Image (cartoon, grey):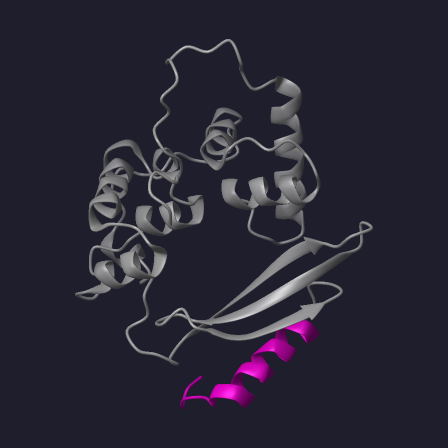
């Protein structure tokens, strides 16, 4: 990451949700993998603790606290409609997912933090609790390699308007891209295909 370049919202989300019982050395490894300093890591985590996770999803603004430019009600309604479609499809419908879907559709998308405020304002999402129980945390870095894989599917618009879905299988410890697969849609068959590729390339452990 270049100096003074804003930290990506997905990295900020991972830091905001960082578990208190993360393995020793996990912070150093995470910072090295994502090109950020430990100082930046701890500053974002402190902001998430003090102001809530949504506030930590974007850098502090250098603009005046008052601005003539506000999110219009039409834009808020569009965001709510996109969220409703994601929810009805059984997909994640948090602020980051709503933002990514709006961008993929060619719509003007507010920042994930602004979307989080919109969802709270419209009473379709609850504010983050001040303190989560320890049992609710899930490790971002899995303790051992090849013990847990993570599958992500991302819609991509090709030249001419055609769409495809890129499946990526990652090792949840090393963040290694185990396998990738491109399909015409987000289907169970395509998901199984990329998992099969990963097993063929890297094997599997008992209990996988």
For the record, the magenta segment spans 189-208
Measuring 53% from the left and 34% from the top, which residue is drawn there?
A: 124
Q: Is residue 208 left or right of residue 140?
A: right
Q: Is residue 58 left or right of residue 114?
A: left
Q: Predominant secondary structure in magenta? A: helix
Residue 113: in magenta span:
no
Which quadrant would the C terminus be assigned to in this image? bottom left
Q: How many marks?
A: 0
Figure check: 65 above or below 55:
above
| Viewer-nearest residue: 170 or 159 | 159
Measuring 27% from the left and 47% from the top, which residue is drawn there?
A: 132
Figure check: 202 above or below 113:
below
Outermost residue to the left: 24
Outermost residue to the front: 3
In terms of image quadrants, where is residue 83? Answer: top right
Outermost residue to the right: 160
> x%, y% of residue 189?
69, 75
| Viewer-nearest residue: 46 or 118 | 46
> x%, y% of residue 206?
40, 90
Figure check: 175 above or below 59:
below
Residue 195: in magenta span:
yes
> x%, y% of residue 39?
20, 45
| Viewer-nearest residue: 58 or 82 | 58
Measuring 39% from the left and 34% from the top, which residue is drawn there?
A: 127
> x%, y% of residue 164?
73, 60
In terms of image quadrants, where is residue 138? Answer: bottom left
Measuring 33% from the left and 54% from the top, which residue is drawn there?
A: 35
């Amino acid at each position: 990451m270049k100096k003074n370049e804003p930290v990506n919202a997905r990295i900020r989300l991972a830091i905001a949700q960082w578990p208190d019982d993360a393995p020793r050395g996990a912070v150093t490894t995470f910072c090295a993998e994502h090109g950020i300093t430990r100082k930046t890591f701890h500053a974002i985590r402190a902001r998430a603790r003090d102001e809530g996770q949504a506030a930590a999803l974007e850098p502090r603004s250098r603009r005046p606290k008052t601005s003539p430019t506000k999110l219009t009600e039409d834009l808020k309604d569009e965001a709510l409609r996109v969220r409703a479609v994601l929810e009805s499809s059984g997909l994640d419908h948090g602020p980051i997912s709503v933002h990514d879907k709006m961008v993929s559709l060619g719509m003007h998308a507010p920042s994930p933090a602004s979307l989080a405020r919109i969802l709270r304002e419209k009473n379709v999402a609850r504010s983050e609790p001040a303190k989560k129980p320890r049992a609710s945390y899930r490790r971002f870095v899995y303790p051992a390699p090849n013990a847990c894989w993570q599958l992500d599917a991302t819609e991509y618009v090709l030249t001419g308007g055609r769409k495809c879905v890129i499946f990526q299988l990652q090792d949840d410890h090393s963040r290694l891209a185990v396998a990738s697969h491109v399909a015409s849609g987000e289907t169970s068959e395509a998901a199984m295909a990329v998992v099969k590729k990963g097993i063929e390339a890297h094997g599997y452990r008992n209990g996988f």
